[in-house]
Image (tube, rainbow, N blue to C red):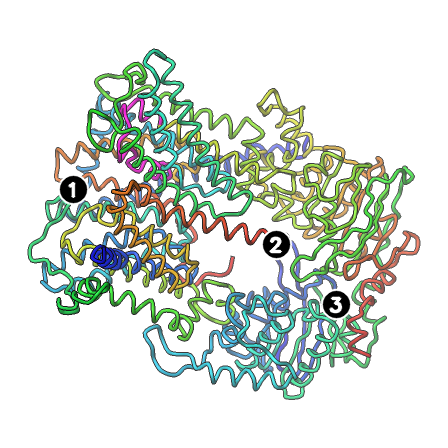
Amino acid sequence: MRLGARDVAKSYGAVQANSGVTLEVAPAEIHAIVGENGAGKSTLMRLLQGLEQPDAGSIVFNDRPIRLRDPEQALGLGIGMVHQEFMLAPELTLLENFVLGHEPVTAALPLGRRIDWRAARAAGDALAAKTDLAIDWDRRAGTAPVHIQQYTEILRLLQRGMKVLILDEPTAVLAPQQADDLFTLLRQLRDQGTSIVFISHKLREVIALADRVTIMRRGRVVASSRIDETDIDTMTRHIVGETAAAAPPAAHTVEAGEPVLEVSGLSAPALAGSHPVRAVDLRVRAGEIVGMAGIAGNGQDELIQCVVGLRKPSSGAVGLNGRALAGCDNADFRAAGLGYISPDRAHEGLAKAASIEDNVMAASQRAPAFRRGPFRRLGAVRSEAFRRLAQLKVRFGRLSDPVASLSGGNQQRLVFAREIATEPALLVVAQPTRGVDLGGIAAIHAILREFAARGGAVLLVSEELDELIALSDRIVVMAEGGIVGEIADETATPEAIGRLMLQQDTHGEAANG
Amino acid sequence: MMQIAEQVLAASVVLATPILLAAIGGLVNRQGGIVNIALEAKMLAGAFVAVVVSSATGSWLVAVLAAAIVSAAIGYLFSLTITRARANMIIAGLGLNVLVAGFVGFIMNVGFDASGTLRMPDVELLPKLLPGSVAALPLVGEALADLDPLTVFAWLSVAALPFLLANTRLGLRLRAAGNAAHVARAVGLREKSLQDFGTAFAGFYSGLAGAHLALASIGLFNEGLTAGRGFIALAAFYFARNRPVGTALVCLFFGFLDATQIRLQTVGLPPQLIGTLPYAMVILGLCLTAWNLKRKAQA
Amino acid sequence: MAEATTEPAAGRSSLMPALERMAADILRFALPVLFAFFVGAVVLAFIGENPLDTYALMLSEGFGSSRRLAATLSAATPLLFTAVATAICFRSGVFNVGVDGAFVLGGLAAAAAGTLLPVAFGWSIAPLAMVAAMAVAGVWLYVPGLLLARLDVDEVVSTLMLNFIALGLSGFLVNTLLLSETSGNNTTDTIHAVAELSRLMPPSTLHSGFLIGLACVFAYWVWARWTPAGYEAKLVGLNQRFARAVGIAIPASIVLVMAISGIVAGLGGASHALGQVHKFSDGFSAGYGFTGMAVALLARNSAFGIVFGAVLFGALASAGTTIQLFSDVPLDIVNVIEGTVMIFAVMELGRLSLRRGRAS
């Protein structure tokens, strides 16, 4: 075994990110690791790279258990990682980035030894020659096309003699032809003896490229096999879980009513490493929970931001309660009846350094009920804060405690308490149970059901398929920035959704064909 | 007329030197990712040390080196508060300016029983490099006759710096630490130590700048000697966006403004307003850059 | 009610953290001060002075008698304004270092009004001069605020540079348009006697500007705690992404705090011109803007802490000048202490990492 893990466990607070994970990557093997977001892949990679240390179990290198203190040590052993976010200094040229940290040098000059650029360029060209790729070494890294940036980073690692390359979703940013080129390079490297760990969501790619696949789910390895002993359906089943938990059907006392949110032809530019939104039509009616499924980075984040007024769409319309709001800011959306549960609770959903009271009362500071003339009615604010927190049973010490003192589940309840208290017509909810323990999840699901039962409209974006199935009246699936399908509640199974999410995969097809 | 031009050129070059030296330090520091707002403090310390050491040893060279080393040491300690103790670099820099001014005044008061101005015996000034006869050359004669070692060193530094930053290992690593510290760390570099080097380097050059202020012609130390030149240096490399040659030209222009202030006064341009020009230029430059960026982002 | 209240221990157990927080606040104020006094003590010991004797002398010279106390409060007066002007921006995450320039221009505007308005305006000259000062200084800092909010122009550099421009501009005006006909260079005429702020404890220079300063601190407290805009500014300072996602208009908040900062600094300049020096001359601000910054940093932007810090630095300044007379300790020790306070106030001593740190 070149690199692996033996029974490793790692937890962050209450969240068990890895438990009993065993992985074996052989020399000269391309080993794919697949799983949903939050399945524990990234944690495992951080452990393999020495960014963190396991709570239990050990990392294995060349058949011997080792303790990786830091990434530098891993680099020294020959374990290199290509991150999703490339590790290139944007203002430096590609050649400068290529040699950074192991520069070939010649004579001594006042500011240290002189870099031998000829040797550097020759080494770079020799490596690049393997790939039929002409690299313009003098280009600034920040202006180079993404696949060239990726190559530069891979070449840098090869130049340093890496025996193991870990690639985190390397094709997410590549066009099909570029992905093919990358695969050619990776196969060559494997044939020369390099071990490659390949993290991907795209099962066709995995079938096309990998020798072995390990599937993770909820922090555990659920399957590991040679690639020719499995197929896409089997993998999909492992990824989304054998059977959905017996989810109670979404019980509704109110039939879906008037449309509350109407999105038509909405397009928006992409965030870094993601897909732009392409001409999305979407409608959410009163009393209805519409689920949105999709692999992370397929345009959901961008779409949500457009629908809550944090991002300006490049074209298309957003209507909320009959008001046309495309391009307006968050305050306008809120005035029209929006509540918003951010997917990034730690940085956007809460102000961690602020008190519980400030967090639960934000967005209401200008409401007439809490003002007298130009002043805030602090008494009224306090009692409303108590009321909101009590209504959603948030357990807390004092209103003045920092919100960071609450547990993850209580923090999320607090966010709901704030967003529901204004009785919005539409609640846009993203990843509501991320980092929340089991009891908290049930409570949050109950809150959402009750909100819909009172006639509220909910747009629910989640990476947890069980959650979507349990809560949604219908589920739309997003891939590559567009909506690729819709499944009614009755026919929704993880397999059906997973198929839409995972197999809408033109890259893999191109790679195959 | 010719004579006036000669005098102005000579004065511009001399007056540009301390700004240029400090700006060289500051721009290397900033390329390494630290905005050094305490160049002024290190210039002041350098000037003080230069006068004291020159008087004690009678050697301008020892004085200049002592000034540079003391200021580099101050810069290094200052850097530690930023890179290791995570002090905000702006506040810490402003604090250092106050602290050093106080400390220098204190030592002057206690050690030399002087307040405000320190006159020392036997201060050796910077020598002139060329024989006085070069003054006869047209236009540049006077400037050449005034040429001192630090001015030459400053311009040699400007000439060498682009090459050194681009082609040495340390230069590359320093720029990497400034441009993307996490990348430097990912390839196994010690980005904080690199930044500490940058700040010590800035201290070294600011010390030279202070030494030039004190030893170029006046041969004494005064609490107001630096008169905001550390901030003018900051303005210079901000305006030239960290490019060594551009920064040098801006410094020369600032030196020119300084040299012509008195003359321009006679044609109705008040010196106080001319003195604000460097600062106004920076704000204007920042606005234009920002406006361009915004336009590009919208396009 | 909340589950928390059904649990009897909850109330009691949360008392400890509250006390701990208060202790931590006091410690955060005291630590940099103690460090600075320690550095000062080392410096004093180095020259053979007994630091304790010196500090005891400073204490009695700062607070020992009602006259000394008046001198201290008089020295603290400009700091009340500049500290509030700084804190209001720092609290919102806006790095305004241009308070000194706004203070200077405010003083200039007030002195100009105090000399140029006809004497016949009588008692109304002082308030008019203050309004002029607030208008000039408010606009002065409104501009970099606008540049930051609309164009993302780095406010540190722009406000730093504006300080020097303010100095140059005022230096120009007091040598030309506003130059005194009677008292030589670099100064305006003395303002009309009727425009002078009243002295509170003659013969001390303590004047009613001190009360205006206290009123400013109080107004700052009210604004920060009791108005929606103050609450919003705080959230902007704590987390911009959060603030935006709860509908707060961040550009408006930034521009507002910058303008208020200018207005307060300008009022401080007016108070200093009308109450203390009765004219404007070069060197009007003895670094009040920067000392005010040290005060705001020490106080962690709290109103109460600002009063405390301003008095502390006022005492240092007033005691510093007199101990220079009675001992061999030069006034510069005050700068040493102030600079050290500034540096230590922003160092994260708890997380001091001499080894290579992790990415955070």
* Residue type at numbered disc 3: His
Q: Chain of mark 1?
A: C
Closest to the observer: A429 or B177? B177
Q: Are marks 3 and 1 on the same chain?
A: no
Q: Main secondary structure of the magenta part?
A: helix
Residue B236 x %, y %:
37, 55
Residue appearing at x 73%, y 32% in the figure: A422
- Which of the numbered marks, if any, corresponds to residue B297? 2
Image quadrant in which you'd find residue B78: bottom left
- Which of the numbered marks, if any, corresponds to residue A201? 3
Residue appearing at x 34%, y 50% in the figure: B231
Q: Is residue B206 above or below residue A407?
A: below
Q: How far apart are labels 2 and 1 at the CA level?
A: 62 Å
Left or right: A9 as drawn, with respect to C151: right
Which span is picked out in magenta?
C270-295
Q: Chain of mark 3?
A: A
Residue A343 x %, y %:
69, 50
Residue B85 x %, y %:
40, 54
* Residue type at numbered disc 1: Asn
